[in-house]
Image (cartoon, coloured by chain):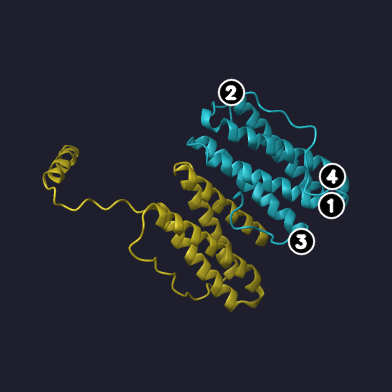
Chain colours: A cyan, B yellow
Amino acid sequence: MSGQPKPLPADSVEAVQRALGAEHAALWVYSLVSAFLPPSFDAPLREGTTAHRARRDATERALAASGATPRPAEPGYRLPQPVTDQATAITSVVAAETDATVAWRAVLERTDDAELRRAALEALTNAAVRGTRWRKTGRIAPTFTAFPGKP
Amino acid sequence: MLRAGALAAVAAPLIASGCTDEPAAPPPPDPLADLAARARADAAAAQAVAGAAPELAAPAGEIARLRTEHAVALQAEVDRARPPSSAPSPAPPVAAPPNGRAHLLESLRIAEEQAAALVPTVPRHRAGLLGSVVAGCAGLREVFA
């Protein structure tokens, strides 16, 4: 992720665009839910936001370096349920992290490029770990799944 | 030494091609077979820990369940790629390791590392499966960290 990003293989651009979409959506969700969570959630909110922002920026750079136009964020995203309290806030973050794992696993399956695979694996793993943490906090069962990112 | 080695390397294919009834060299072992075996061993160890330490029964039971799922999926992919002549031997029952919790967390870390090392080079469909195995182990470590 240092220096000038390497162009992406042409056949993986669409999957990477979708992963970028999942990063945009996750940032939107993290920003939306913060108003519904007490200050004790500041650290995990900040951590998730920082990670998704870094991933979004790196993904946009990689797409631009490949001659593709990174798709912009949507004005809003559909949630599993309206966010009205702490429980629905956590459910929404879990859903966003789950969507990110699915999108990044899809990238793994659509490229032979070792560097892109490493980045996708890191994104998938980190989203799975954060998702597990949020599930644990929200006492959402099951706390983990055997195959994060498997659609 | 170098010279002799180079000559041997050149000579070997000639000899092999001369003897057509020589059985073909066995294909290299499938790297996923190792991961599947490790997953079976992890599940067996977790089961032993769950039985020996009541306070660890719940988390160890979860590790056993997750690693069994990994073993089944990995073995299915190994068998798909190269249909087996016999079923893989199940992991033999093991004694509970001392320091069960640390042992299980370390096993998950190693499993994660081994699967991650293969991700850059395997065929695409395997990259997805291994990516999920890596993320599954990492997520599970987080539960009990």
Q: Quadrant of the N terminus of chain A?
A: top right
Q: Disc 2 is attached to a residue of which chain?
A: A
**Crowdedness near tag 4: few (<14), some (14–19) or many (≥20) residues, C-alpha within 10 Å:** some
- C-alpha separation, residue under disc 1 versus residue under disc 4: 11 Å
Numbered mark located on residue A40 in the image: 1
- C-alpha separation, residue under disc 2 versus residue under disc 4: 33 Å
Q: Earlier in the sequence, mark 3 or mark 1?
A: 1
Numbered mark located on residue A34 in the image: 4
Label 4: which secondary element: helix
Q: Earlier in the sequence, mark 2 or mark 3?
A: 2
Q: Position of residue B103 (x, y in %)?
A: 55, 65
Label 1: which secondary element: helix
Please name whichever residue, B3 or A149, is drawn nearer the observer in this view of the structure: A149
- C-alpha separation, residue under disc 2 versus residue under disc 3: 42 Å
Q: Disc 3 is attached to a residue of which chain?
A: A
- C-alpha separation, residue under disc 3 versus residue under disc 1: 16 Å
**Crowdedness near tag 1: few (<14), some (14–19) or many (≥20) residues, C-alpha within 10 Å:** few
| Labels 1 and 4 in the same subunit | yes
Q: Earlier in the sequence, mark 2 or mark 4?
A: 4
Residue designated by label 3: A139
Please tell me which residue is depicted at 54% across the width and 62% down the height of the picture.
B69
Mark toward the viewer: 1 or 4:
4
Please tell me which residue is depicted at 74% across the width and 44% down the height of the picture.
A47
Residue designated by label 2: A65
Mark toward the viewer: 1 or 2:
2
Q: Is disc 1 in contact with disc 4, using a CB cutoff of under 8 Å?
A: no
Label 2: which secondary element: helix
Q: Position of residue B87 (x, y in %)?
A: 38, 66
Q: Earlier in the sequence, mark 1 or mark 4?
A: 4
